[in-house]
């Protein structure tokens, strides 16, 4: 492609509303243009990358035996009413009435549509397992669309849905999808991790997220230094410390600690590390018995002062309200506590203690008295040890729950999600097949998503420097950029450049030739080439040509190499990874 | 692809709501499934064809220098308000409010969005000409969606928009698009015609439609037997008959013709051909002067009795109301006529006569008197010749307006449209560039559409028989189908079939192997293969294998050929056209 025949509008200034690097660079490099909040047009240079991501996703899905379909974006409300989601789904579901006043939505996902398709077209166990996917435009009416295509309202997803008559069959397809996703993100050239994920409110048994690692990521991922273990911090198990709890040695002392209500205050007051202070969190309770009446009692959770409560783990405790709500001062008082000074001794509530906190000895904790803490507190001696549970977020250095190595924490951007749905949709929509014995069976489902447009942004978050994007070869809009020094000014450069362009194109490379004339300075050309992130650059100059050389540099390291004219194709073939 | 790994659900019964052949066959062959009125899911076998159409369109657009972008489906109302279309567009525009109560629509077309993109990104004549296209999902909220994907609500379009600073530049791109469309429809393997079209209410200078010829088409296309001339009958010029009008020979006679008010009645009464009777059509007038007051006078149009009024031509007459409205009995009486017996003599109205009717002599016409006609009527002798214009639809056998050959009429399905828009959108949206002299110039635009999903249906309308679809090779879901007689029953057939499948796949063919076991009869397999329209079929049988032969048949002629096993690849290579 010649620059003079290509619409590329780069910008020096970063748009004011672009706060993350990928959004900034996608705008500056002219990959996308904003139409309205959360709505972007993919410009030629951006679309080239998007299509490459799509193609890799499609190839690997086909290889894994999934079959491509294309469902409508506009979906009838009736189906969403069958699963109850028409009412459950919040404002993110863009609802619309057609000219006959019938309700529709612009689909943010397609579980209902695919389940309807399956129940109408699949009647026998012999048609299963079946895995159908599409690469399609979706809409989610975000309250506050932001981060460019990372959290846009209109976006492109690859969504797949599988159907089975047994959990074993579901597991097999799930494993195939896990392998296909691994192949996809490897081929995309991204540093990623498949991580165990919480199945959350969607229900279902098992779930993995695929995260592209990037310091700007929204999620914390824990993974083992010595194994494949990786999990969203939301889900990663914090194992119990090794060995026995140290014996009590200190004397229990009640200390006046005026206004020291936070862990930091208390640690500073006692001049100890926060890990020596017991953190108490009082949350609202929930009735475990449906027939129970009156206000449910609050529940007290104890953690080590340097640890963070994991809300998802806490919400799984029977008798704890989900979503988690903190108790009020009055509720704390009602169980014998004082806000800011809650401790285990004498509290009239069901208590739980985190595994690490259960291992503390001679520690500091609230005395359930205004402006007072205990020092030298010990479990079993000074208060009964509450029920021990895993309550906290893992931290770097924790032993890995897989038993091998310790945990590291990195930030990730979720770009894929695979999920064992079970019968959540098939049951409410009555999607059944006849089994081997002629009996009606509800189909078991899995679903598998990749945020195709989001992958593009995540790739940039992971691969950029101060000058712009650094594309992995597989998804670069062009593989090779040619910058001629003096195009249409030096006859030798012009001729050599045109020949090189033909030669590289004929050799199968996707080449971007900056053939703008002398009105565009070499500095602007180099800056544009770096901004749009073309991974391999060849410079043609009079000085080089005199020596029979071209200058080659990879975008990633920028190191310049002199390559003989005759060797350039072979050199690029050895450098370009796709 | 093996049948046992492919979701293909064919149906014997034709769905009740499918009235056109393409809709019937797309449903029966399992290409599409209905989600709701005018909303269809593309199933694997259908999507394969759709993607092939897309790929051919994309390749030829790129080859013609157009650049692909991808615009959002959801568009802000503000842009449509700028061009006035937010109010002009009827119920077909699916309007929607987002969670912040802002107005959007699901785009049926993208003139506003692309013009906004151009005004924000194009500032200099040096960036022009520019031709941007997308292949994208559109929505048109049809009152009565029908004919399957032929007139669906959600559909896929290739829409391109070009920008220019001069009419010459627009014409150049227009010509390129004409050539690209010709290449596209040729590659698709369709019998089509580019035809001159009316620019209608969209305004603009020049327009061609691309029609796939099929007897079920909605439009009549006129084309020359001896040249490339083709035009929508709406637009085709009816040239004046050659030579002079014959001289008057008959005596003018007033004849009592009780109740003979139609051309057929009158022709039967006089025992002459309808071409000997003058047809009079009285239509409502329109003021040509804005300041004129009172009811505009009706206008009378005379045609030969066997000719049809062309309403588009009539509406272009100054002083005629558009859209065309017929005058009432009272209005006819007011100009001295009698409904059913209107003739030229003594009429007090502006009259026009069609070129062919102006050539009539000794003809029959109304006498402006109840139950009376004249015979032996002649222009200039019995009434002044009104102003002569082209008023009628062309008919088969008319001389071609290009001067070569005569016209034939065929029915066509519009699948593409190229259009010189001019400044309709750029002016109202203030999309300007600076020209060579630093002066602000409004961009001149062209637009170029192909109904990608519609092409699939049109291809079927043109290519089918009683047994199903007959795909052109280029867009067949699979090129070659293998039907084994006794798969997994005869060891020889099973082995030979598997080998053949591998061999043909390795040779680059897209092969569909019906590997269903003996529970599926050969009859069902043959019927499915014909229904889904695979253009080349190979049958593997014990009897054939004993003689070292396979049976080959093309879907189009069905003639069976015995081909030696060793020759099958070469034979298919000679047969498959893509």
Image (cartoon, coloured by chain):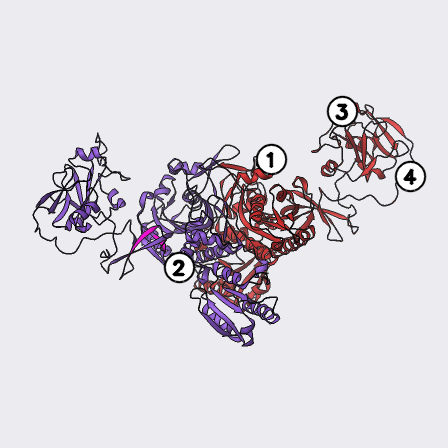
Chain colours: A purple, B red
Percent across and percent down for residue A99 are 53, 34
Q: Please state which of the two labelled residues, at mark 4 or mark 1, is closer to the viewer.
A: 1
**Could you tell me residue A574's position as x and y percent?**
46, 71
Between the C-alphas of marks 4 and 1, the distance is: 53 Å
Can you tell which mark lies on residue B247? 4
Name the quadrant containing residue B555.
Answer: bottom right
Q: Tell me the residue that label 1 is attached to.
A: B88
Q: Measured along the vertical axis of the image, is residue A292 above or below residue A267?
A: above
Crowding near the residue tagged with mark 1, few <14, some 14–19, many ≥20 C-alpha atoms within 10 Å: few
**Disc 3 residue crowd, few under 14, some 14–19, many 20+, Cα 10 Å:** some
Q: Which residues are magenta?
A: A209-224
Q: Nearer the viewer, mark 4 or mark 3?
A: 3
Label placed on residue A190: 2
Measure the C-alpha gap from mark 4 to mark 3: 34 Å
Q: For the residues carrying marks 3 and 1, which lies nearer the camera in this image?
A: 1
Q: CA distance from mark 3 to mark 1?
A: 32 Å
Between residue A272 and residue B199, name the one nearer to us.
A272
Q: Callout 4: helix, strand or loop?
A: loop
Check disc 2 and report its element: helix, strand or loop. Answer: loop
Q: Main secondary structure of the magenta part?
A: strand
Q: Is residue B512 among the parts visible in the rendering? A: yes
């Amino acid at each position: 492609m010649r620059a003079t025949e290509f619409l590329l509008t780069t910008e020096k200034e970063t748009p004011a509303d672009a706060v993350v690097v990928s959004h900034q660079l996608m705008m500056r490099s002219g990959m996308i243009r904003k139409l309205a909040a959360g709505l972007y047009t993919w410009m030629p240079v951006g679309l080239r990358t998007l299509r490459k991501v799509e193609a890799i996703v499609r190839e690997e899905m086909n290889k894994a035996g999934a079959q491509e379909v294309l469902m409508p974006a506009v979906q009838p409300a009736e189906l969403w009413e069958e699963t109850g989601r028409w009412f459950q789904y919040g404002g993110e579901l863009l609802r619309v009435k057609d000219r006959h006043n019938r309700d529709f939505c612009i689909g943010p996902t397609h579980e209902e549509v695919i389940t309807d398709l399956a129940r109408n077209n699949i009647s026998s166990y012999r048609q299963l397992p079946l895995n159908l996917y599409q690469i399609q435009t979706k809409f989610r009416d975000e309250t506050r669309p932001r981060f460019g295509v990372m959290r846009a309202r209109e976006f492109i997803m690859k969504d797949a849905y599988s159907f089975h008559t047994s959990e074993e069959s579901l597991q097999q397809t799930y494993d195939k999808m896990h392998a296909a996703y691994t192949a996809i993100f490897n081929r995309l050239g991204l540093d990623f991790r498949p991580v165990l994920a919480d199945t959350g409110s969607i229900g279902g048994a098992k779930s993995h997220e695929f995260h592209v690692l990037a310091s700007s990521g929204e999620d914390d991922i824990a993974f083992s230094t010595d194994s494949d273990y990786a999990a969203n911090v939301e889900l990663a198990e914090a194992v119990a410390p090794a060995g026995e709890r140290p014996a009590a040695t200190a004397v229990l002392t009640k200390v006046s600690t005026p206004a020291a209500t936070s862990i930091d205050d208390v640690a500073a007051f006692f001049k100890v590390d926060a890990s020596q202070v017991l953190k108490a969190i009082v949350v609202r309770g929930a009735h475990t018995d449906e027939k129970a009446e009156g206000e449910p009692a609050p529940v007290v959770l104890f953690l080590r002062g340097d640890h963070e409560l994991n809300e998802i783990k806490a919400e799984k405790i029977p008798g704890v309200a989900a979503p988690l709500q903190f108790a009020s001062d009055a509720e704390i008082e009602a169980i014998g506590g004082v806000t800011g000074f809650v401790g285990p001794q004498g509290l009239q509530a069901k208590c739980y203690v985190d595994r690490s906190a259960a291992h503390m000895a001679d520690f500091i904790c609230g005395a359930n008295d205004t402006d007072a803490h205990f020092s030298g507190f010990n479990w079993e001696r000074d208060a009964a040890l509450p029920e021990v549970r895993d309550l906290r977020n893992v931290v770097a250095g924790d032993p890995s729950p897989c038993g091998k190595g310790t945990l590291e924490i990195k930030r990730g951007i979720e770009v894929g999600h695979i999920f064992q749905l079970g019968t959540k949709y098939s049951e409410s929509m009555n999607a059944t097949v006849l089994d081997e014995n002629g009996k009606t069976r509800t189909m078991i489902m899995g679903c598998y998503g990749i945020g195709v447009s989001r992958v593009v942004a995540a790739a940039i978050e992971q691969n950029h420097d101060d000058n712009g994007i650094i594309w992995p070869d597989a998804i670069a809009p062009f593989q090779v950029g040619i910058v001629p020094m003096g195009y249409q000014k030096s006859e030798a450069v012009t001729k050599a450049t045109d020949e090189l362009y033909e030669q590289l194109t004929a050799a199968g490379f996707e080449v971007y030739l900056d053939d703008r004339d002398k009105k565009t300075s070499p500095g602007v050309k180099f800056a544009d080439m770096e901004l749009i992130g073309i991974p391999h650059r060849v410079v043609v100059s009079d000085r080089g040509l005199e020596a029979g050389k071209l200058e080659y540099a990879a975008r990633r390291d920028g190191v310049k190499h002199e390559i003989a004219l005759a060797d350039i194709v072979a050199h690029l073939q050895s450098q370009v990874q796709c």
